[in-house]
């Protein structure tokens, strides 16, 4: 009865704020019209008749079956007597409308396993603009929602974890808290983090979901049927900076890879100073070693005979792949991404020539 009363009061507030859904407004109008026209009936018969009519109204609104005529439009709270004593007779019915409305919303919600009570308690932010929208969470984390995206989150996080639900695309910058892992549910996957930044994107055509990490480390897994007691296991993918995974919705498989533009994950002086990647007669092996450390990416050279080839080049570039293109030009190699690694194949030591990224 307490939940039904809360449902009634929420519908009542929305009705008075002129924000009620059409079916909610029609039921409320019908309720008052029934009270106004049947006050002379015996109490028991009156309540029974009223509830029967309300149920018929609900059935009409939710199934499209034969409807009762719309009542005379009036603002029932303007009556000299509010007749709130009659509310008890219809709390259950109105509570049903309230929860049925939430069930309808939950049925189209892409994350499964959430109870209607939990769903109804979540705050909701939707980006209806043409640019990204910043959402500031109470724990200090921020989320940048792409146009059309929505974020569902509790008013206050639980004591042991922080759980949010994403519909659409978003970039997350999570406040570090090892004692309270951050869980992002999106479609059929859950991304677990402690403190990091990453993006989650959904392909609207295929339904595939991509998670790409900028900083820190995340675990991506298929979400459990129930989100209430979910604890990530060892069946997912661990991602570090510049790595990404695509979850194939149809086959329920993971495909790992590198982000389109890997950035520096190490910002020590040896990588950020102007001459950090300006090489003079440096063996390819040392160049590769420095690139791996700077970008957190494994680079495999299949032709071991070129590891000692001297490299003289200015590789001052913002991303990893332009640097590799310069090496390809120098040694006649080819580079390709396989999983989360780069494979450098072919090539030979070429006569000395200098290549600069910014001639």
Image (tube, grey):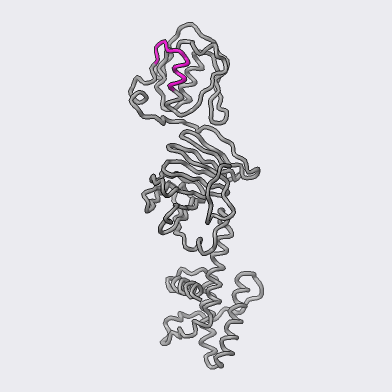
Answer above or below: position of 190 versus 97.
above
Camera-side residue: 339 or 219? 219
Q: Residue shown at 37%/25% (left/top)?
A: 271
- Does 285 lie within the magenta span? yes
User: Where is residue 279, by image quadrant?
Assistant: top left
Left or right: residue 225 compared with residue 175: right
User: Where is residue 47, by image quadrant?
Assistant: bottom right
Q: Residue shown at 59%/74% (left/top)?
A: 58
What is the quadrant of the C terminus in the image? Answer: top left
Q: Give the range drawn in magenta.
A: 279-290
Left or right: residue 136 compared with residue 213: left
Q: Residue shown at 35%/19% (left/top)?
A: 275
Left or right: residue 165 compared with residue 346: left
Across and down, in percent, residue 345 comes to: 57, 18
Across and down, in percent, residue 304 comes to: 55, 14
Across and down, in percent, residue 57 comes to: 60, 76
Answer above or below: position of 101 versus 55.
above
User: Where is residue 108, by image quadrant?
Assistant: bottom right
Answer above or below: position of 161 versus 208.
below
Camera-side residue: 321 or 75? 321
- Does 64 lie within the magenta span? no
Across and down, in percent, residue 231 comes to: 52, 49
Answer above or below: position of 337 versus 66.
above
The number of numbered badges drawn on the structure is 0
Camera-side residue: 176 or 86? 176
């Amino acid at each position: 009865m307490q939940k039904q009363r809360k449902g009634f009061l929420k519908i009542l507030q929305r009705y008075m704020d002129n924000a009620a859904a059409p079916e909610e407004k029609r039921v409320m109008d019908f309720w008052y019209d029934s009270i106004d026209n049947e006050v002379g009936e015996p109490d028991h018969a009156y309540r029974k008749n009223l509830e029967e009519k309300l149920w018929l109204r609900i059935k009409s609104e939710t199934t499209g079956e034969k409807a009762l005529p719309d009542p005379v439009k009036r603002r029932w709270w303007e009556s000299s007597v509010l007749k709130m004593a009659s509310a008890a007779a219809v709390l259950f019915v109105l509570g049903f409308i309230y929860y049925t409305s939430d069930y309808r919303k939950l049925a189209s919600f892409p994350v499964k396993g959430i109870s209607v009570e939990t769903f109804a308690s979540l705050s909701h932010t939707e980006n209806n603009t043409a640019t990204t929208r910043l959402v500031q969470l109470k724990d200090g984390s921020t989320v940048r929602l792409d146009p059309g995206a929505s974020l569902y989150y509790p008013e206050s996080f639980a004591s042991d974890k922080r759980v949010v639900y994403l519909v659409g695309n978003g970039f997350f910058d999570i406040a570090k808290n090892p004692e309270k892992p951050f869980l992002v549910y999106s479609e059929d996957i859950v991304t677990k983090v402690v403190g990091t930044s990453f993006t989650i994107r959904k392909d609207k055509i295929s339904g595939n979901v991509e998670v790409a990490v900028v900083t820190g480390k995340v675990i991506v897994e298929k979400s459990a049927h129930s989100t209430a007691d979910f604890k990530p296991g060892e069946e997912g993918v661990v991602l570090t900076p510049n790595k990404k995974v695509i979850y194939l919705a149809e086959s329920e498989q993971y495909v790992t890879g590198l982000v389109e533009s890997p950035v520096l994950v190490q910002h020590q002086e040896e990588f950020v100073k102007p001459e950090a990647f300006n090489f003079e007669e440096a063996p390819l092996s040392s160049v590769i070693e420095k690139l791996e450390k700077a970008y957190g990416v494994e680079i495999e050279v299949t032709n071991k005979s070129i590891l000692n080839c001297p490299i003289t080049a200015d590789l001052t570039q913002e991303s990893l792949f332009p640097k590799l293109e310069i090496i390809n030009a120098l040694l006649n190699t080819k580079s390709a991404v396989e999983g989360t690694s780069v494979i450098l194949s072919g090539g030979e030591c070429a006569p000395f020539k200098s290549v600069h990224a910014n001639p």
